[in-house]
Image (spheres, rainbow, N blue to C red):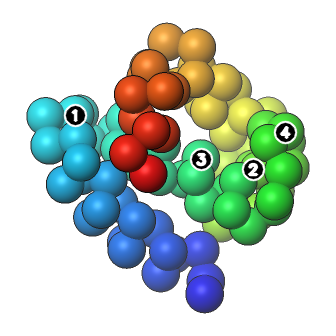
Amino acid sequence: MPANQLYHTWSDQIRQLHQTARKMLVHNFTWLLIGIYLSRKVHLSAIVNQLPGSAKLHSTVQRLRRLLQHGICVRKWYGPI
């Protein structure tokens, strides 16, 4: 399944689990999960290589790094999934 199709399916599910979350948090977390799923790795650079988009590798890695450091409590978000 293409990454864009996965995004729409998974983001809907994540929004149902975290209804009060900001839209950008859901967006970034969904792309993080898709990258992990497609790359089958947990290294940010490998995850980002699987994501579509025209952003540079380094800036997308930084965005996901900030998400993991400050944006979400990983256990709380990933636990229900």
Residue at image x 67%, y 39%? 60
Q: Secondary structure at mark 4?
A: loop
Amino acid carrying mark 4 in the image = His
Of 67 and 78, nearer the camera is 78
| Earlier-in-chain disc, 4 versus 1 | 1
Asked if residue 26 shows in the view, the reply is yes
Q: Tell whether 79 sits left or right of 68.
A: left
Residue at x-position 81% and y-position 59%: 40
What amino acid type should be assigned to the residue bearing mark 2? Answer: Val
Specify the farthest residue to the top: 70
Closer to the chain start, of discs 3 and 4, is: 3
**In the figure, 12 relative to 61: above or below?**
below
Q: Which residue is mark 4?
A: 43
Dot 3 surroundings within 10 Å: few (below 14), some, or many (20 or more)?
Answer: many
- Mark pair 3, 2: CA separation: 8 Å
Q: Split into 4 quadrants, where in the image is the N terminus? A: bottom right
| Quadrant hosting residue 54 | bottom right
Q: Residues within 10 Å of mark 4 (few under 14, many from 20)?
A: few
> In x, y percent, where is residue 24?
34, 38
Mark 1 lies on a secondary structure that is loop
Crowding around mark 1 (Cα neighbors within 10 Å: few <14, some 14 to 19, many 20+) is few
Where residue 34 sits in the image (x, y, percent)? 60, 60
- Numbered disc 3: secondary structure: helix
The reply, left or right, for residue 40 in relation to residue 63 is: right
Mark carried by residue 21: 1
Residue on which disc 2 sits: 48
